[in-house]
Amino acid sequence: MVNRFPAAEEFVSLRDAMDRLMAESVVAGPFRSLWSGGPAAESGAARMALPLDVYATQDEVVLIAAAPGLRPEDLEITIDRGTVTLRGQMPNVAQAEETKGATWYLHELPHGRFQRSVSLPIEVDGGAADATFEHGVLRLRLPKAEQARPRQIKVRSLANGTGHSEAITPGASGGTNGETA
């Protein structure tokens, strides 16, 4: 008779299975550092990537990062060929003076060095960037490079082969406004 259930020493916890799956994955993603116990976890570094929001308006790209417990001088921001990189170090609350001699029951807050990079799909002007930090939230404003900003192009129509053209205004009914250019 075949035993359908493995021996106790063959059981693998769900966490161990997920760690192995992520460690063996060829796709690096935002969850890899969250689940894997790789080099970052072994060195005591933060296990979770710095959470980010990134959006674009007509004139700029805005990156918002949650960095609780940090001061503005604890963050390093670089922009290189369309990639924004945030670096820093989260303090370990277990090493604070007030916790000396304490009995710890749970210690999950991330600590250690972190680095987070985001490749932007839009060219930005890094020289005109503005970074502010308030209540643990970094807001990085990156103006779009002049060549990446949207432009309105006037479309001309050659009427009846006379060489005159009519300007077409976006949103006008019928596509033309009847004015000659």
Image (cartoon, helix red, strand yellow):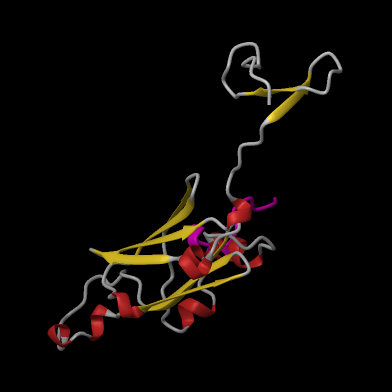
Question: On screen, 130 above or below 88?
Answer: above
User: Residue at 32% of width from left, 65% of height from top?
Assistant: 132
State the residue at coordinates (63%, 69%). 81
> Which of the two residues, 57 or 168, is positioned nearer the viewer here?
168
Please state the horizontal and vertical placement of residue 15, each as a whole percent of the image. 49, 61
Residue 4's place in the image compared with 33, above or below, is above
Q: Is residue 66 visible?
A: yes
Depth check: 17 or 29 in front? Answer: 29
Residue 165 in the image: state x and y as whole percent: 75, 23
Left or right of 176? Residue 14 is left
Residue 90 seen in the figure: no
At 30% from the left and 80% from the top, the residue drawn is 91
Numbered range of the magenta stretch: 1-15
Asked if residue 2 is among those painted magenta in the image, a careful observer would answer yes
Q: Nearer the viewer, residue 1 or 64?
A: 64
Q: Main secondary structure of the magenta part?
A: loop
Q: Quadrant of residue 76?
A: bottom left
Q: Is residue 93 above or below residue 64?
A: below
Relative depth, front residue between 141 and 39:
141
Residue lying furthest right in this view? Answer: 161
Q: Residue 129 in the image: x percent, y percent?
A: 45, 66
Quarter of the image for residue 73 reads bottom left
Q: Position of residue 149 (x, y in %)?
A: 58, 49
Left or right side of 92 for 57: right
